[in-house]
Image (tube, rainbow, N blue to C red):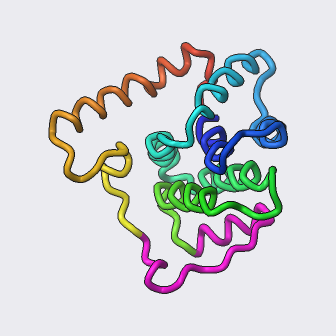
Amino acid sequence: IILGAKVAKCDGVVNETEVRTFRQVFRANEAHINEIGNLFNQARSSAEGYEPHAAHLAQIFSVEHAILEDILVRLFTIAKADSTHLSHEEVYVLRRIALIFGFSESDFIRTAARAGIYLKTLPPEQNEQKKTTPYDILGLPASATDEVIKRTYRTLVRKFHPDKLQATGLPQV
Protein backbone atom coordinates (compact mmCIF):
# COMPACT_ATOMS: atom_id res chain seq x y z
CA ILE A 1 0.00 0.00 0.00
CA ILE A 2 2.68 2.44 1.05
CA LEU A 3 4.95 1.67 -1.91
CA GLY A 4 1.98 2.10 -4.27
CA ALA A 5 1.23 5.53 -2.79
CA LYS A 6 4.88 6.58 -2.94
CA VAL A 7 5.17 5.53 -6.61
CA ALA A 8 1.95 7.39 -7.45
CA LYS A 9 3.32 10.52 -5.76
CA CYS A 10 6.86 10.49 -7.18
CA ASP A 11 5.89 12.22 -10.45
CA GLY A 12 3.97 15.01 -8.73
CA VAL A 13 0.31 15.05 -7.79
CA VAL A 14 -1.54 11.77 -7.28
CA ASN A 15 -4.53 11.80 -9.63
CA GLU A 16 -7.77 9.82 -9.70
CA THR A 17 -6.49 7.49 -12.45
CA GLU A 18 -3.60 6.40 -10.24
CA VAL A 19 -5.94 5.87 -7.28
CA ARG A 20 -8.31 3.74 -9.41
CA THR A 21 -5.38 1.75 -10.75
CA PHE A 22 -4.09 1.22 -7.21
CA ARG A 23 -7.50 -0.16 -6.20
CA GLN A 24 -7.49 -2.51 -9.20
CA VAL A 25 -3.98 -3.92 -8.74
CA PHE A 26 -4.04 -4.17 -4.95
CA ARG A 27 -7.42 -5.70 -4.20
CA ALA A 28 -8.33 -5.77 -0.54
CA ASN A 29 -11.01 -7.10 1.72
CA GLU A 30 -13.92 -4.64 1.71
CA ALA A 31 -13.88 -4.59 5.52
CA HIS A 32 -10.43 -2.95 5.41
CA ILE A 33 -11.03 -0.48 2.57
CA ASN A 34 -11.29 2.61 4.80
CA GLU A 35 -8.14 1.76 6.74
CA ILE A 36 -6.24 1.04 3.54
CA GLY A 37 -7.49 4.31 2.05
CA ASN A 38 -6.30 6.23 5.12
CA LEU A 39 -2.90 4.56 5.00
CA PHE A 40 -2.61 5.27 1.25
CA ASN A 41 -3.55 8.94 1.79
CA GLN A 42 -0.98 9.36 4.56
CA ALA A 43 1.74 7.71 2.48
CA ARG A 44 1.03 9.74 -0.66
CA SER A 45 1.74 13.02 1.09
CA SER A 46 5.37 12.57 0.02
CA ALA A 47 7.30 10.33 -2.38
CA GLU A 48 10.15 10.10 0.11
CA GLY A 49 10.64 7.31 2.61
CA TYR A 50 9.83 4.32 0.42
CA GLU A 51 13.14 2.55 1.04
CA PRO A 52 12.36 1.11 4.50
CA HIS A 53 9.09 -0.32 3.18
CA ALA A 54 10.83 -1.89 0.19
CA ALA A 55 13.50 -3.33 2.48
CA HIS A 56 10.84 -4.74 4.80
CA LEU A 57 9.08 -6.49 1.90
CA ALA A 58 12.44 -7.76 0.59
CA GLN A 59 13.12 -9.25 4.00
CA ILE A 60 9.68 -10.86 4.33
CA PHE A 61 9.80 -12.38 0.84
CA SER A 62 13.56 -12.98 0.65
CA VAL A 63 13.13 -16.49 -0.74
CA GLU A 64 10.05 -15.73 -2.82
CA HIS A 65 11.29 -13.49 -5.64
CA ALA A 66 8.13 -14.19 -7.64
CA ILE A 67 6.08 -12.28 -5.06
CA LEU A 68 8.52 -9.36 -5.11
CA GLU A 69 8.40 -9.36 -8.90
CA ASP A 70 4.60 -9.33 -8.82
CA ILE A 71 4.66 -6.35 -6.42
CA LEU A 72 7.04 -4.54 -8.78
CA VAL A 73 4.78 -5.24 -11.79
CA ARG A 74 1.87 -3.73 -9.86
CA LEU A 75 3.97 -0.68 -8.99
CA PHE A 76 4.87 -0.24 -12.67
CA THR A 77 1.16 -0.45 -13.48
CA ILE A 78 0.39 2.36 -11.02
CA ALA A 79 3.27 4.46 -12.38
CA LYS A 80 2.06 4.21 -15.99
CA ALA A 81 -1.60 4.88 -15.10
CA ASP A 82 -1.41 8.64 -15.63
CA SER A 83 0.78 8.78 -18.74
CA THR A 84 1.96 6.74 -21.69
CA HIS A 85 5.57 7.25 -20.56
CA LEU A 86 7.15 6.95 -17.15
CA SER A 87 8.77 10.07 -15.74
CA HIS A 88 12.44 10.09 -14.82
CA GLU A 89 11.41 10.17 -11.15
CA GLU A 90 9.16 7.13 -11.53
CA VAL A 91 11.89 5.11 -13.24
CA TYR A 92 14.37 6.16 -10.56
CA VAL A 93 12.08 5.13 -7.67
CA LEU A 94 11.08 1.85 -9.34
CA ARG A 95 14.72 1.03 -10.12
CA ARG A 96 15.70 1.73 -6.49
CA ILE A 97 12.88 -0.52 -5.25
CA ALA A 98 14.05 -3.24 -7.64
CA LEU A 99 17.62 -2.92 -6.31
CA ILE A 100 16.39 -3.15 -2.72
CA PHE A 101 14.41 -6.26 -3.72
CA GLY A 102 17.69 -7.70 -5.00
CA PHE A 103 16.87 -7.56 -8.72
CA SER A 104 19.46 -7.07 -11.43
CA GLU A 105 19.07 -4.51 -14.21
CA SER A 106 17.90 -7.26 -16.59
CA ASP A 107 15.32 -8.40 -13.99
CA PHE A 108 14.14 -4.78 -13.74
CA ILE A 109 13.73 -4.44 -17.52
CA ARG A 110 11.98 -7.82 -17.79
CA THR A 111 9.60 -6.93 -14.96
CA ALA A 112 8.80 -3.59 -16.61
CA ALA A 113 7.99 -5.46 -19.82
CA ARG A 114 5.54 -7.66 -17.89
CA ALA A 115 3.70 -4.44 -17.05
CA GLY A 116 3.76 -3.33 -20.70
CA ILE A 117 6.64 -0.88 -20.27
CA TYR A 118 9.64 -1.34 -22.53
CA LEU A 119 12.82 0.19 -21.16
CA LYS A 120 16.27 0.32 -22.63
CA THR A 121 19.24 -0.84 -20.64
CA LEU A 122 21.41 1.73 -18.95
CA PRO A 123 24.78 2.64 -20.43
CA PRO A 124 27.49 0.24 -19.13
CA GLU A 125 28.88 2.72 -16.61
CA GLN A 126 25.41 3.12 -15.06
CA ASN A 127 24.46 -0.53 -15.45
CA GLU A 128 26.52 -1.58 -12.46
CA GLN A 129 24.18 -2.49 -9.65
CA LYS A 130 24.81 0.07 -6.93
CA LYS A 131 25.17 -1.18 -3.42
CA THR A 132 22.24 -0.47 -1.16
CA THR A 133 23.76 0.60 2.10
CA PRO A 134 22.06 0.80 5.46
CA TYR A 135 22.38 4.58 5.12
CA ASP A 136 20.35 4.44 1.89
CA ILE A 137 17.65 2.38 3.54
CA LEU A 138 17.43 4.73 6.51
CA GLY A 139 17.50 7.76 4.19
CA LEU A 140 20.61 9.16 5.88
CA PRO A 141 23.92 10.43 4.55
CA ALA A 142 27.00 8.27 5.20
CA SER A 143 28.28 11.03 7.48
CA ALA A 144 25.40 10.59 9.97
CA THR A 145 26.43 10.19 13.59
CA ASP A 146 25.73 7.04 15.59
CA GLU A 147 23.13 8.95 17.60
CA VAL A 148 21.25 10.06 14.47
CA ILE A 149 21.43 6.54 13.00
CA LYS A 150 20.05 4.97 16.18
CA ARG A 151 17.31 7.60 16.53
CA THR A 152 16.24 7.23 12.89
CA TYR A 153 16.27 3.44 13.10
CA ARG A 154 14.18 3.39 16.28
CA THR A 155 11.72 5.90 14.83
CA LEU A 156 11.24 3.78 11.70
CA VAL A 157 10.91 0.59 13.75
CA ARG A 158 8.19 2.19 15.87
CA LYS A 159 6.43 3.74 12.88
CA PHE A 160 6.41 0.59 10.72
CA HIS A 161 6.24 -2.16 13.31
CA PRO A 162 3.86 -4.89 12.05
CA ASP A 163 1.75 -4.74 15.23
CA LYS A 164 1.28 -1.00 14.88
CA LEU A 165 0.39 -1.30 11.19
CA GLN A 166 -2.08 -4.07 11.99
CA ALA A 167 -3.64 -1.89 14.70
CA THR A 168 -4.31 0.76 12.02
CA GLY A 169 -6.24 -1.86 10.05
CA LEU A 170 -3.58 -3.10 7.67
CA PRO A 171 -4.24 -6.79 7.01
CA GLN A 172 -1.54 -9.30 7.93
CA VAL A 173 0.71 -10.56 5.16
100 versus 166 height, above or below: below
Quadrant occupied by the N terminus: top right
Quadrant for residue 5, please give it: top right
Q: Quadrant of the C terminus?
A: top right
Please give the name of the residue rendered at 16% of the width and 41% of the height, measured from the top-left corner. 145
In this rendering, the count of numbered labels is 0
Q: Is residue 128 magenta?
A: yes
Name the outermost residue toward the front.
12
Residue at figure coordinates x 60%, y 80% from the top left: 121
Residue under the point 71% across and 24% down: 37
Task: Report x, y in % for residue 87.
Answer: 67, 60
Which residue shows up at 62% across the image and 24% down it?
Answer: 39
**Residue 147 is one of the magenta-drawn residues:** no
Viewer-proximal residue among 60 and 32? 32
Left or right: 57 with respect to 144? right
Q: Is residue 139 left or right of residue 101?
A: left
Give the percent coordinates (x, y) of residue 169. 62, 16
Does 52 appear above or below 35? below
For the residue pair 140 and 37, the one nearer the viewer reads as 140
From what the image shows, is residue 92 above or below residue 55?
below
> In the image, which residues are magenta?
106-129
Residue lying furthest left in this view? 146
**Where's residue 99, x and y in %?**
48, 61
Predominant SS along the magenta part: loop
